[in-house]
């Protein structure tokens, strides 16, 4: 798979992805790779197609989009597989919005449908490790999902994903509705997870916070990648500053 | 007239109602599906048990699992046909398909088993328990014991086991369940197989109380519907109490007022209850959730 000269060790490799709703193209991404231990940020305005992109990667949607293109996880094509099989292969989506079972306790929310095998690049977290990572969840373990705050739900969603042994974690707006301190706490946890080898694709509207933890950044506009590069270089890019960080153009 | 005897009759009848309804309770609670062929699956379960016992000479204790296997197979077949409508939650389409399936089953059963009434006798149904002035058959006692056991086992499975937790995830949010790695389709198949097996088991237990006919099923589906709705759509605990309550009400009303109007009276109660408590007796948390 080196014919196109791209790195072959990518955990996620996407080519020519097209997503359309009722004939209207919502996403057109020609190439997207995520390397082991890398955090790639996806930013863009509302309706730019960020959620549509990660949902399509997971083969998941509350609507019924048409998805075409190559999606490979660890070099294996998964684009023809149903959602739960992609999950079992190690592609875990923590969606935006409803991400916990509200009529089940925190403890029950953390029960898993299958026992993934740990492998190089695939760490399977035990419930105890989730509670160490997010001590708040231990305190709330007997509470129902419906009783949790936004931050606790986010931790629970991420916790469940970690227990399913992700090779790649897709996070859709984890900072939404969270207090600023909690945002940085969740994102710093993501940084620590990436350091231990987990790859993360992070969709964020909070660009300033995202900039602190991502290695690489993609800017999505009307479903297309309009800007891409290392976070360090893009931080000072006037186009980013103007459009997403609220700075005034000189 | 003996009031205590009527109470005993009502308790037995109520457990029979609850047992017959349990498959649909799970069906509705987990998959939000209805099955208007439920009554004909009951009829099928009764006739398979009858056939096994009287024609094939299989002992009653083995005829029951046989009937359950046949019921489960029909459940799987129905779900296979309706899978698409299930995922689209197309209830109207599912209603018509299950109703149609019931009529097909009725016709086929009449061809195979004939349309004359039969008696399903078991070793338990022909022996009585005399408790002073009170009287019931061993079959009646077995119905009560089996119903309590099945409800306890189901509640325990849903609350305490891994499979139960996964089923509850699908019940609450099938789409989020997919992201938890659950093969939702398999759960839907499993639930319909359970519905078929459970109603066949109930038929094998309850049918010895009355003569069986291939045309029966209407009464069973209506009573099941009442039990499930009064219990609070899909609530396991609620269904148990609704079933027992309905049985006692039916028996006492029949004895004290008139047996001719019990069904009408039961529905009057149902309508009144739905006006006062639209969610049924149990509004929420219990068992299989909504």
Image (cartoon, helix red, strand yellow):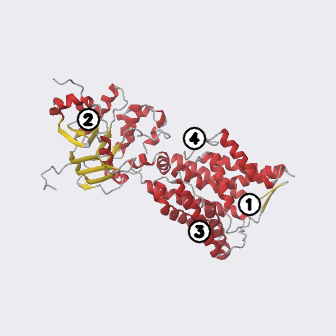
Question: Mark 3 or mark 4: which comes first in sequence?
Answer: 3
Cα gap from disc 1 to disc 4, whole angstroms: 35 Å
Left/right of residue B244 with respect to residue A144 in the rendered view: right
Q: Nearer the viewer, mark 2 or mark 1?
A: 2
Decide: is A250 above or below B28.
above
Left/right of residue B46 with respect to residue A67 in the rendered view: right
- Front in this rendered view, residue B178 or B219: B219
Mark 1 residue crowding within 10 angstroms, few (<14) / some (14–19) / many (20+):
some
Label of residue B138 in the image: 1
- Front in this rendered view, residue B54 or B172: B172
Question: Mark 1 or mark 3: which comes first in sequence?
Answer: 3
Label of residue A191 in the image: 2
Q: Which chain letter matches label 3?
A: B
Check contact, mark 1 vs mark 3: CB within 8 A. Answer: no
| Circles 1 and 4 on the same subunit | yes
Q: Mark 3 points at which residue?
A: B104
Cα gap from disc 4 to disc 2, whole angstroms: 40 Å
Cα gap from disc 3 to disc 2, whole angstroms: 61 Å
Decide: is B273 above or below B39.
above
In x, y percent, where is residue B19?
65, 55
Cα gap from disc 2 to disc 1, whole angstroms: 67 Å
Q: Mark 4 points at which residue?
A: B284
Q: Which chain letter matches label 2?
A: A
């Amino acid at each position: 798979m080196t014919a196109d000269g791209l790195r072959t060790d990518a955990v996620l490799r996407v080519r020519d992805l097209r997503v359309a709703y009722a004939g209207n193209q919502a996403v057109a991404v020609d190439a997207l790779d995520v390397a082991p231990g890398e955090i790639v940020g996806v930013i863009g305005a509302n309706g730019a197609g960020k959620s549509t992109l990660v949902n399509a990667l997971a083969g998941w949607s509350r609507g019924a989009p048409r998805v075409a293109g190559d999606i490979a996880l660890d070099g294996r094509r998964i684009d023809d597989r149903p959602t739960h099989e992609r999950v079992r292969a190690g592609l875990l989506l923590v969606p935006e919005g409803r991400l916990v079972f509200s009529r089940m306790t925190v403890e029950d929310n953390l029960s898993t449908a299958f026992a993934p095998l740990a492998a190089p690049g695939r760490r399977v977290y035990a419930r105890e490790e989730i509670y160490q990572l997010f001590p708040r969840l231990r305190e709330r373990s007997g509470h129902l999902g419906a009783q949790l705050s936004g931050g606790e739900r986010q931790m629970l969603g991420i916790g469940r994903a970690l227990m399913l042994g992700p090779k790649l974690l897709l996070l859709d707006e984890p900072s939404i509705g969270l207090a600023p301190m909690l945002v940085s706490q969740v994102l710093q946890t993501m940084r620590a997870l990436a350091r231990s080898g987990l790859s993360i694709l992070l969709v964020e509207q909070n660009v300033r916070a995202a900039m602190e933890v991502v290695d690489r950044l993609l800017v999505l506009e009307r479903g297309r990648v309009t800007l891409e590069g290392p976070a360090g270089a893009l931080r000072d890019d006037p186009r980013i500053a103007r459009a997403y960080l609220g700075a005034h153009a000189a | 007239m003996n009031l205590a005897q009527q109470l005993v009759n009502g308790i037995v009848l109520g457990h029979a109602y609850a047992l017959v309804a349990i498959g649909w309770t799970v069906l509705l609670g987990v998959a939000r599906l209805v099955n208007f062929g439920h009554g004909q699956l009951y009829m099928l379960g009764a006739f398979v048990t009858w056939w096994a016992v009287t024609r094939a000479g299989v002992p009653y204790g083995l005829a029951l699992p046989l009937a359950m296997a046949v019921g489960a197979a029909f459940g799987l077949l129905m779900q296979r046909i309706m899978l698409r409508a299930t995922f689209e939650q197309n209830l109207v389409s599912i209603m018509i398909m299950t109703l149609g399936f019931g009529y097909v089953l009725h016709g086929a059963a009449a061809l195979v088993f004939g349309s004359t009434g039969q008696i399903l006798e078991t070793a338990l149904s022909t022996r009585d328990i005399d408790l002073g002035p009170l009287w019931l058959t061993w079959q009646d006692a077995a119905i009560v014991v089996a119903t309590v056991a099945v409800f306890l086992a189901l509640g325990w499975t849903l609350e305490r086991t891994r499979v139960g937790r996964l089923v509850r995830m699908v019940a609450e949010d099938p789409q989020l369940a997919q992201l938890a790695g659950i093969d939702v389709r398999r759960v839907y198949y499993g639930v319909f197989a359970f519905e078929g097996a459970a109603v066949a088991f109930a038929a094998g237990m309850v049918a010895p109380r009355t003569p069986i006919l291939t045309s029966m099923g209407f009464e069973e589906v209506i009573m099941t519907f009442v039990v499930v709705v009064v219990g609070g759509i899909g609530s396991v605990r609620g269904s148990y109490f609704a079933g027992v309550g309905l049985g006692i009400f039916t028996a006492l009303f029949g004895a004290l007022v008139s047996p001719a109007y019990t069904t009408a009276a039961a529905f009057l109660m149902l309508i009144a209850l739905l006006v006062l408590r639209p969610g049924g007796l149990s509004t929420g948390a219990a068992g299989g959730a909504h």
